[in-house]
């Protein structure tokens, strides 16, 4: 009966021994575990960039200068030498009016000029004779002064006839409509046989030296073009892109569409940029130095507070820096505070 407690105590000791041995063995193993070496990480240097996504607008290619051509005198069109879409050169004759009346008026002005010239020569010859006679005392001084007035009037009449002749010559030249710039005919308003008034549009000419894209921008997006850093223009039928620049913005919204017309100039366009082509304009907002964009994988949470691992440039070690998240985008996380441009963060 007395051996039972001893037997029970022995069993307890046997049970504890393996446990104690395991504890001692674990302690020994922990003591001899080698120290872990430095682990490489992937880091990236931050740069100020725009946190706003790039917006793309669709538009059409236009000429920067497009003018309506018209005759400067009225008349009947007897010939039109160009068609829609034709490329023309500066000085090329595009259309012609019937110049019969203009020729008659020019000839009449020429005859009047010849008569005025004859009167002036006669008055000048009389003035010379009166000058000799007044020195001889054959005529009075008042008669000589009167002849001077006659000569001055004849000279004025001659000058008037000369200007009238030049005017008629110009009107005869205006019966030919010429291109004042290299370009493309974009509209034909009249046909041969039609009588047109002075200044009535006949043709439309798009100049060939500059191209731009017209886009319609909604009200809530027009401010993006005030600080736009980069504009790129792309054509739908090619993969080539061109740098762009905002040339003009409408001061008021269209009353029907409530959009603003923005004209984006294409810098250094090639011959492949043709009028009327469909083009896309991509707008990237200017960089905000107060906001930095980091990849989504760089964000680390220390409890409930967001943080980012920053690389110390001197010791090449990591430090956890708390940050303030300003927003999220499909390109990463927008950091509003806690980081500065030039720092390296672990991705």
Image (spheres, rainbow, N blue to C red):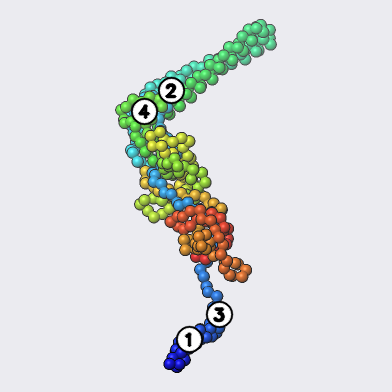
**Mark 2 vs mark 4: which is more N-terminal?**
4
Q: Tell me which label, 3 or 4, sits earlier in the chain.
A: 3
Residue where numbered disc 2 is placed:
106
| Viewer-side label of 3, 4 | 3
Q: Secondary structure at mark 1?
A: helix
Question: Can residue 261 be seen in the rendering of this structure?
Answer: no
- Image position, residue 2 (x, y; %): 45, 92
* Residue highlighted by disc 1: 16
Numbered disc 4: secondary structure: strand
The residue pinned by badge 3 equals 35
Q: Quadrant of residue 310?
A: bottom right
Residue positioned 45% across, 55% down in the render:
329
Instruction: Tell me, yes or no, whether the two marked residues, 1 and 3, touch with CB atoms within 8 Å.
Output: no
**Which residue is under mark 4?**
97
* Secondary structure at numbered mark 3: loop
Local packing at callout 3 (Cα closer than 10 Å; few below 14, some 14-19, many 20+) is: few
**Label 1 crowding class (10 Å Cα cut-off): few <14, some 14-19, many 20+?**
few
Q: Nearer the viewer, residue 115 or 237?
A: 237
Quarter of the N terminus within the rendering: bottom left
């Amino acid at each position: 009966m007395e051996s039972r407690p001893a037997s029970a105590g022995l069993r307890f000791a046997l049970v504890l021994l393996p446990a104690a041995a395991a504890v001692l063995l674990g302690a020994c193993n922990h003591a001899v575990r080698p120290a872990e070496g430095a682990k490489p990480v992937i880091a990236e240097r931050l740069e100020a960039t725009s946190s706003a996504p790039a917006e793309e607008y669709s538009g059409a290619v236009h000429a920067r200068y497009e003018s309506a051509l018209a005759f400067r005198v009225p008349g009947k069109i007897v010939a039109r030498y160009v068609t829609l879409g034709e490329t023309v050169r500066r000085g090329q004759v595009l259309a012609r009016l019937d110049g019969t009346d203009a020729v008659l008026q020019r000839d009449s002005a020429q005859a009047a000029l010849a008569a005025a010239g004859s009167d002036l020569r006669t008055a000048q010859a009389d003035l010379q004779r009166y000058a000799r006679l007044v020195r001889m005392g054959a005529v009075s001084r008042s008669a000589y002064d009167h002849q001077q007035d006659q000569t001055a009037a004849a000279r004025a009449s001659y000058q008037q006839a000369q200007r009238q002749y030049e005017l008629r010559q110009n009107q005869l030249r205006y019966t030919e409509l010429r291109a004042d710039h290299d370009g493309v005919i974009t509209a034909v308003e009249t046909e041969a046989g039609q009588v047109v008034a002075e200044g009535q549009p006949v043709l439309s000419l798009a100049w060939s030296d500059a191209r731009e894209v017209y886009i319609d921008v909604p009200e809530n997006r027009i401010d993006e073009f005030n600080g736009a850093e980069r504009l790129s223009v792309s054509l739908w039928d090619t993969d080539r892109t061109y740098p762009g620049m905002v040339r003009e913005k409408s001061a008021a919204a269209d009353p029907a569409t409530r959009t603003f017309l923005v004209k984006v100039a294409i810098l250094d366009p090639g011959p492949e940029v043709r009028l009327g082509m469909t083009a896309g304009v991509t707008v990237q907002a200017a960089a905000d130095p107060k906001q930095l964009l980091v990849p989504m994988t760089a964000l680390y949470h220390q409890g409930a507070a967001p943080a980012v691992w920053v690389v110390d440039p001197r010791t090449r070690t990591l430090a956890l820096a708390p940050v303030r998240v300003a927003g999220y985008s499909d390109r990463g996380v927008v950091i509003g505070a806690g980081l500065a441009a030039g720092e390296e963060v672990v991705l």
